Each structure stands twice: as C-alpha cells, then as structure tokens.
Amino acid sequence: MEKRHNRDFSRVFTTVMVAVLTVILIASGFAMDAEKAFAASAKVSLSGGGTVEKGESLTITLKYSGATFGSATARVTYDSSILEYSSCSGAEANGGGGTVILTMANGSGVESLSCKLKFKAKKSGSTSVSVSTTDVYNIDMEELSAGSASTTVTVKSTADKASTNADLSAMRVSSGTLSPSFSPSVTSYKVKVPNSVTTCTISADKADSKSSVSVTGSPNLKVGENVRKVTVTAESGKTKTYTITITREAAEGSSSGGGQSGETGQNSGSSDAQPPENQPIETEIGGTAYIVCEDFEKVEIPETFHEDAAAYNDKQIPVIRSTEGNLVLALLKPAESSGEDAENEAAWYFYNEKSNKFTAKHSMTVDEIFAYGKSMSDNAASMAGGTDLSEGGEKQNSAGLDADKMMYLIFGGTLALLLIAVIVLQIGIMKGRKR
C-alpha cells in the first residue's frame, strides 16, 4: 500500500515539474522574441521627390536611422521610361533600367546611414521611387528590421504644350519685290509689276514645323490691285495672316476712260483692242463642261501639295503640285452650276501640262509612285512629331524603296495599283470644305 502511494506521488510530482519547466521555457522564448522585436528595429526614409522639368536633374536621398549602424543593403526601383539613373554618392551602387542595388557600410558605428541618388527626367509623367531593405546590421553585426519607403516624382514639360508660333521665316514673290522687305512681324506688303507680268506666285516658309500655311487668291494678275493672303495656323490653332497687294501696271497707251466718246469708240473697234482679262477658263471632260477655279480659299489643300501655277494653252492657271512624284491637280467646277452649288461640286482633277488635259485618273511610273509614297510617309512622321531616321537612315530608306520595287516586280503591279488607290482616296478625302 505504501509502495503504491509512493509511485502515485512520484508520477504527480514529475508531471508538475514538466509543466513548470515548459512554462519557464515558453516565457523565456517570448521574452527573447519580444526583446528582438522591440529593440532590433530601424527606420528607413526617402526624400527629394516632387515636380521637375523635363531634362532637369533631381536627387533622391535614402536614409536609415534609429540605431548604431554597421551596414545596409537596399533595392531602389523606379520607372525607367520617365527617369534615368545617373550616379550615387555615399554608397556602392549597381544597376539602372528601373532598379539600383545599394550597399552602405561604416565600421566605426554611426547613428544613421545615408546616400544620394541622382536621376535625370526623361519625359513627362509621374513615377514612384521606392526602396526595400534586403538586410541591415548594427555595429555589433546584429541584424535589424527595417520597412520600406517611397516618394513620388512628377515630370512636366513646357515643350509638351501646343506651339503658338504662327510666324513665317521667309516669303518670296516670283515677280517684283516685297515692300517693305520681309520681316516675320510685318503682315502687310506691296508689290509692283509691269503689265507684261500676268502671273505672280508666292512662296512662304513657316517658322515652326508644327504650323501649317495656306495661300489664297489667284496667281493670275489683272490690271490694277490683286490681293493675296498667306495664313499661318500654329499648332495651338492661333492664326496670323500676311497680306500681299500686287499691282499690275496698265499697258502703255491704254485709255484711262477720260478721253472723248468718239475716240473711245474708235479705240474699242481697232484691231489693237485687248480681250477682257481673267475670263473663266473652260474645259471639257467626258462631254461635260467645267470651269477652272482660281480661288482655293474654301477648300483644303491635300497634304504634301503646295500652290503653284501651270501653263494652259497660252494662259496660266492656278494648280497645286506635289512635293514628290510630279503630280499636278487643278480645281474644277461644273460650268452649268452657279453660286453655292458650283462651289460645293468643285473637285480636284489631275492635269497634264504637256497635253493640256484634265483627267479624273492618272497613270504614274513606278518611281513616281514610290516618290509620292515616301513624301506621304515623311509628312505623316512630321505631323506625329517624328524625327529623322537613325544614323545611316538615308541608306536604310533607299534599301526600303528597293525592297518595295522588288515587291512591285514580284506581285505584278499590285502594290502600284494599291498606292494609286491610296493617292486617289487621299485626294477624295481632302475635297471637304473648311468649317
């Protein structure tokens, strides 16, 4: 009986001691974890964000504080399309393209570790520059805990705003001299030409490649004053108009209307009498009579074309001419229409200067097709703000044209037909009236 009692006591005692030791061990472990959690921590921060101008440099400062530090390793991330990493001071840095790895160390123990990263603003936009800590140690080489931090950088560019430049850089006339001499700030000019000059064209160069230029008024000159206007439209929509008044002198010996009636009648019946000036020029296409329009003010000029004059029999007619491809277009309206109906029915027609004929279709050589196609692509790149081809671009362009010509030979002219269709379609679209 006594032996049994002793065994029971021993079992109870052992169980109690195991429970006590377990509690002690758990409490000791919790105390160690608590000490590590509350004592072994550091603070990390990033500063230097904000708003900068495109092309400017900016500095981001990374700092660890709250302990006596020995070393730290961190990863900094950013949007490489907006910012470009340049350099770092105060740390060993490696990387770029969106990530920079930093290593900072101090064997003497300091109350903070810091470094400065320098970036360049590449383009407009906003990006978050963030840091995450890989590891950080105090002077006793005990590992510390540190969180993450971030700052925001916004890049702005005044160049991204639409240009308001509506100036010309130069302006010339084919006959006579501008008075006064051209200046971008002067908008009114006079030109005097002798009676023998029947046509005067105007060439205008825009000061800003993003602006557009239109010329109104007929290049054909009547005796007396002829007003031409050059309007420049800036990218922002701002406009500036230059006015050129061209005065064509009267023929020598012509009557001014102040003579006696008998003399006037005699002169009007003589063989030297001149026909009225600027009579409408008529032509016929497919059995329908058309009149050549001399004013392009109410129509859009197709891209890659500019105003010019062309010979038609013994007269000069206003036309538009392509920069490449030697295409010439004239604006015709039905002769039987009048007023607003005639203006609405006016359309572009191809004009052959050698045969003096107008047609709705035009045959082109392969070289002309590719020359025009190149001018269209160059113009599209310019309108989109594109740049010239990269180094060696001219050779690359020539190779591209050779490849296209090879396609033309392989596909039996299909590509050429498609390009002609594109040309006709573009001209058709640009027929729309200005609003």
Image (cartoon, helix red, strand yellow):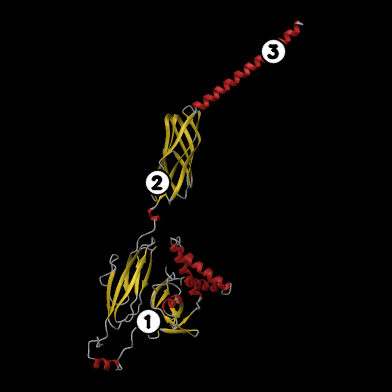
Measured Cα–Cα span from mark 1 to mark 3? 126 Å
As drawn, 23 above or below 380: above
Of the image marks 1 and 3, the number of the one nearer the N terminus: 3
Q: Position of residue 372 (x, y in %)?
A: 47, 71
Q: Position of residue 195 (x, y in %)?
A: 28, 83
As shown in the figure, which amino acid type bears the numbered disc 3? Val
Q: Position of residue 113 (x, y in %)?
A: 43, 33
Q: Which residue is mark 1?
A: 316
Say if residue 355 shows up in the picture. no
Measured Cα–Cα span from mark 2 to mark 1? 59 Å
Task: Count neighbours of disc 1 (C-alpha within 10 A) and say few if under 14, some if 14 to 19, many if 20 or more.
Answer: some
Q: Which residue is mark 3?
A: 12
Foreground of the two, 124 or 374:
124
Hey, which quadrant is residue 10 in on the image?
top right
Of the image marks 2 and 3, the number of the one nearer the N terminus: 3
Task: Count neighbours of disc 2 (C-alpha within 10 A) and say few if under 14, some if 14 to 19, many if 20 or more.
Answer: some
Q: Are marks 2 and 3 in contact (CB under 8 Å)?
A: no
Q: Secondary structure at mark 1?
A: strand
Checking the image for residue 397, the label placed there is none
As shown in the figure, which amino acid type bears the numbered disc 2? Thr
Q: Are marks 1 and 3 in contact (CB under 8 Å)?
A: no
Q: Secondary structure at mark 2?
A: strand
Foreground of the two, 327 or 163:
163
Q: Secondary structure at mark 3?
A: helix
Hey, which quadrant is residue 261 in on the image?
bottom left
Measured Cα–Cα span from mark 2 to mark 3? 74 Å
Checking the image for residue 51, the label placed there is 2
Q: Position of residue 324 (x, y in %)?
A: 44, 72
As shown in the figure, which amino acid type bears the numbered disc 1? Gln
Say if residue 412 shows up in the picture. yes
